[in-house]
Structure formats: structure tokens, C-alpha cells
Image (cartoon, rainbow, N blue to C red):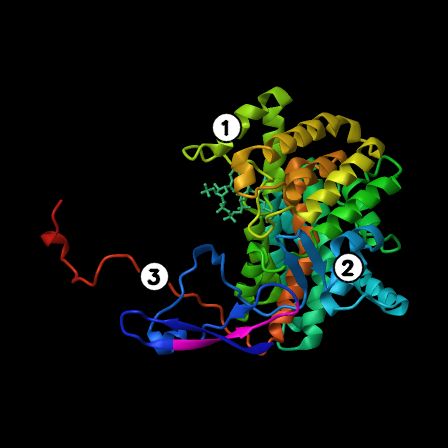
Amino acid sequence: MVTNRTVTITDNTTGDTVECPIIEGTHGAPVISIKGLYPALGMFTHDPGFGATSSCNSTITYIDGDKGILLYRGYPIEQLAEKSSYLEVCYLLLFGELPAPEEFARFSAKIRQHSMVHEGMRTMIGGYRQDAHPMGMLVGLVGSLSTFYHDSLDINDPEHRVLSAYRVIAKMPTLAADIYKYHLGQPFNYPVNSLGYVNNFMRMMYAVPAEPFQISPTAVKALELMLILHADHEQNTSTSTVRLAGSSGANPFACIAAGIATLWGPAHGGANEAVIHMLNEIGEAKNIARFLDRAKDKDDPFRLMGFGHRVYKNFDPRATIIRQACHDLLGELDAGAQQAPLFEVAQELEQIALSDDYFKERNLYPNVDFYSGIILSALNITVNMFTVMFAMARSVGWIAQWMEMMVDAEQRIGRPRQLYTGAAKRDYVLKRDRED
Ligand code: CMC
């Protein structure tokens, strides 16, 4: 909401000024609209990493980084984690409200209807090396989904947009499981739509033709929790990428493939994989100090993976929930006992880092990725699949944010400016006249 407050920016050399309106949202810091800045002063703002820049209006997710609050459509993450299901959270993120029972039944049926992928996708999977990184495969496969739906890719048609959302949410588990099976050299499983969303995914992941399939309710509960916690996180790097790609009019599958590519990086979703490698490397509590020293050494590129966040400066509520889930569930999961020593090292590392001045001064706390790999390992999911699990969960957030953007009256092609620091204008020199 535009307020009657303004901020005046003055060029102290020329005395030129511009009055910028202040806009307030429901929660959080107000923003200064700087649209009038360039016309009035001939200057842009400069904010590498967008640390001080709001890029859009959004009604989906809210984070208060100082208080450790995360809300999806106004509902606290703690309540959703305890009481909701991933599919219900998908509905909430997409349409803004918790579904009534009938609405939820219709929505679940729609998602089930789209769970299969074209057989051509499986031919594509066969073209990858068996040791291909699952995230590389997922980028390619999700982008390729667009090639199967020429008749329903009109981004200006609201029905096509919703259909694409259903397809993304429904097909991600199938693709993730197919990638996993290919990696293991086991036959693919087709979805069984009489099963719930998470059970269906776990069956596709773990069932083998030679054995009856059984999955424990604790494992389903653990994965459901992981999916809910990762479902959306306002304008994070991959979501901003999805929006930027979408601002050009690119189709939703292409946009989400761009989001998946972005999530892969170790500073973002790839951190969950990096944390497990780091914890394994640390191995025992007696080695923690050496790794902390490396993390503090500015000449060493090593960072404590799973620590720090651009927005959370107190604690990441998702990390708190996952740490508790490790306590509650590890003992009950098949491979949980094997993860217990790693969990111990992780907790010890957290304790030592949180009492260290370097981490205290910089407000560096464990983030969602710090403990998530321990749960995923206890579910027998291989480390190279961790970021795929994150992508599967986040796909609803990406598509919900894309759908929101498509009806935003303020939406324009995303096109930042720059501070040019290269060579000054100069004339071309013929090759023969250039000095060696
Ligand atoms: N280990 C050691 N030092 C750190 C770390 C860390 N993990 N994170 C930040 N710092 C230091 C950093 O060197 C800087 O110090 P100084 O002020 O002396 O230069 C200060 O803390 C501020 O860090 P920054 O890099 O300016 O913060 P940022 O907001 O740009 O980066 C981050 C946020 C998450 C990329 C970063 O904390 C990081 O690289 N963490 C490790 C990777 C990680 O766990 N990523 C997952 C993020 S949460 C889930 C997700 O997004 O997928």
C-alpha cells in the first residue's frame, strides 16, 4: 500500500532532488519506490546481490529473518509442519487458502491424473551416462517437458497455467524416481495413483520387482515433513531466476528448469549435499576445531556448509524443526542408526560454532540444509539425490510464484542495469598494427 510517507534523495553536488514514495506491505520492512530516480537524477541504484532490493509484490510467503518467522500464505511453518500435508501445502501456495475437503479431493485427483510422464522421457534418460549428476538430468528433463505440451503452453491462458502447475507438481516425483532408478541400474516404476503423493513417490523410488514393497509410516512422515519445509521461501535465488526467466514470456517448464539449475549451486540448495560431504570429512568431534579455523580463514575458500543465510539472522525455523525431527525419527528409520554418529558431529559442530565469536558476530546459524541431509540419508536416499529432493519440494513454490507473476499488473521484463567499469570508448586497431 502506498503511504503518504516519502524519502527525498538529493544529489549534494547539483542540489537536484527526487521524492520517492514509501510503500508498506502486510508485514516486514516498507520499501522505497525508486522508479522516479533515473528520470530525476540520471542515476541508478547499485546493489550487487540484491541485499537491499525488493523485486516484486508477493502474497505467497513471508520471512522475518530477525525473529526466525516463516509464513506460507500467513500460516506459520511450525503449524503446517505439524498438522498439514505436502499436497495441502501445494494447494495453499497455489491458490492462497487451505482447501475445504471437497476442494482438496478435486485437487488431489487432478494431481494424480498427471503423474505419468511420456515414455519419450524415459528414452531421454537412457541417453545420460549412468554416473550423470541427477541435478544435471533434472534440469534437462524438466525443460524437455515443454516439448510434450504444445497445445497447452499459452502462458496468457489461465487454464493452461493451472494445468502446467498440476503437471509440474505431479511429474516431479516420477522424474526424480526415474533418475534415481537409472542411477541404481534398477527398472523404472510407474506411479500407482491409488497411493498418496508421498507413498507413491517412495514406491517409485524404492520398490523392486523381486520383492514385495513396504514402507514405514515414519519414513513417509519424515519425507512429508521435508517436502513441506522446502516448499517455498519467497524471493530466494532460484525463485528469482524462475521469475526473471518468466518475465521474458518463456514457458513455465523452461522457467522451472532455470530454477533447478540455480538451486544446484552449493550456496543454495546444493548445500544439503555439501553438508554431508563436510560432516563425513570432519568425521569425529575432535576435528571440528580445524574445520572452524578453515571457515574463519579469509584466504581459504572453505565455508561451513549449512551455516548462514541472507535473511535469517537469528535462527532458521526450518533447521529447528529438522533438528527436532532427527531426534524424533532417527531411531525409527531403517538407516537411522547409521546416521546417528553424523548427527552427533553435526550437533557438536553447531554448539561450538554458535559459541564462537566469528559466527556470533556475523549472526551465522544453521540453515535448512544443515540437518536435512541426515534425514534424507536415514531414508536411504543417496547423497547426489539430495538437491533433487529439494527441487521436487520447491517446484510448487516456483510455479506458484510464476503464476502470481503472470497476473501482476506491475510485471515487466526483468532487466537490471549495471555500473560499467570496462575500457573507455576507443577505436578499432587493425591486426597488423597491434603490438605483440
Ligand atoms: N562459513 C563461514 N563464514 C561465513 C559463512 C559460512 N557458512 N556464511 C557467511 N560467512 C561470513 C562471510 O564470509 C562474511 O564475512 P565477512 O563479513 O567477514 O566478509 C559474512 O559471514 C557475511 O556473509 P555473506 O557471504 O556476505 O552473506 P550472504 O548473505 O551473501 O550469503 C550464504 C549467504 C547462505 C550464501 C552464506 O552464508 C553461505 O555461503 N553459507 C554456506 C552455504 C549454505 O549453507 N547455503 C544454504 C543457504 S540456505 C538454503 C538455500 O538457500 O538453499
Residue 83 in picture, x, y percent from top left: 84, 54
Q: Residue at x 66, y 42 (%)?
A: 386
Q: Is mark 3 within 8 Å of ligand 1?
A: no
Residue 117 seen by the camera: no
Q: Amino acid at mark 1?
A: Asp
State the CA–CA distance, disc 3 to disc 1: 36 Å
Q: Quadrant of residue 399?
A: bottom right
Dot 2 or dot 1, earlier in sequence: 2
Please give the range of residues in magenta.
18-26
Residue 224 in picture, x, y percent from top left: 79, 48
Nearer the observer, disc 2 or disc 1?
1
State the CA–CA distance, disc 3 to disc 2: 41 Å
Q: Is mark 1 within 8 Å of ligand 1?
A: no
Circle 2 sits in a helix, a strand or a loop, which is it?
A: helix
Q: Residues within 10 Å of mark 3 (few under 14, many from 20)?
A: few
State the CA–CA distance, disc 2 to disc 1: 41 Å
Circle 3 sits in a helix, a strand or a loop, which is it?
A: loop
Residue 46, above or below 372:
below
Predominant secondary structure in magenta? strand
Is 20 magenta? The answer is yes
**Do callouts 3 and 2 mark residues in contact (Cβ within 8 Å)?**
no
Farthest left residue in view: 433
Residue 346, above or below 98:
above
Is 284 magenta? The answer is no
Q: Residue at x 81, y 53 (%)?
A: 197
Nearer the observer, disc 3 or disc 1?
1
Give the numbered dot on residue 293. 1
Residue indicated by mark 3: 419
Q: Amino acid at mark 2?
A: Val
Residue indicated by mark 2: 89
Q: Residue at x 21, y 60 (%)?
A: 424
